[in-house]
Amino acid sequence: MARDSCLSRVVAGVAVGGAVGGAVGAVYGTYEAVRCKIPGLLKIRYIGQTTVGSAAIFGLFLGCGSLIHCGKSY
C-alpha cells in the first residue's frame, strides 16, 4: 500500500475525527450531566454515551470528507 493511498487518508480522517469528536463529546456530556443534575452512575453512563456518539458521528463525517477529497488533485 502506497504511503499516500486513498485508504490511508480515509483511515487517518476517521481516526482524527473520532479523537476530536470524543474529546468534544466528553466535555459536552460532562457539562450536560452536571447541568441536568443526573444522579450517580447514570452520570457516567450519560457521559460515555455522549462521548461515543459524538466520536462516531464526527469520525464518519471526517472520513467521508477525506474520501471525497481523495479523488481531487490540485
Image (spheres, rainbow, N blue to C red):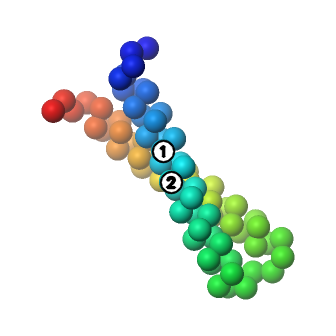
Res. 27 visible in picture: yes
Q: Quadrant of the C terminus?
A: top left
- Observer able to see residue 53: no
Which residue lies most toward the left here? 74
Q: Amino acid at mark 2?
A: Val
The image shows residue 1 at horizontal and vertical percentages of 43, 14
Q: Residue at x 25, y 30 (%)?
A: 71
* Mark 1 in CB contact with mark 2 (< 8 angstroms): yes
> Dot 1: what SS?
helix
Q: Residue furthest top?
A: 1
| Label 1 environment density (alpha carbons within 10 Å; few <14, some 14–19, many ≥20) | some
- Residue sitting at the far right: 40
Residue at 39% in and 42% down = 64
Residue 16, labelled with which disc? 1
Expressed as whole percent of the image width and height from the top left, the position of residue 32 reads 62, 78
Q: Is residue 56 above or below residue 24?
A: above
Q: CA distance from mark 1 to mark 2?
A: 6 Å
Q: Quadrant of residue 67?
A: top left
Type of amino acid under label 1: Val
Tell me which residue sits at (70%, 61%) in the image: 48
Q: With 68 as the anchor, is 20 left or right in this view?
A: right
Q: How many numbered marks, from 0 up?
A: 2
The image quadrant that residue 63 belongs to is: top left
Q: Is residue 74 left or right of residue 34?
A: left
Mark 2 is surrounded, within 10 Å at the Cα level, by few (under 14), some (14 to 19) or many (20 or more) other residues, namely some
Task: Return the mark for residue 29.
Answer: none
Left or right of 14, for residue 72: left
Q: Which mark is residue 20?
A: 2
Where does residue 17 sit, x and y in percent of width and height?
Answer: 47, 48
Q: Is residue 46 above or below residue 66?
A: below
62 relative to 57 in the view: left or right: left
Task: Classify mark 2: helix, strand or loop.
Answer: helix
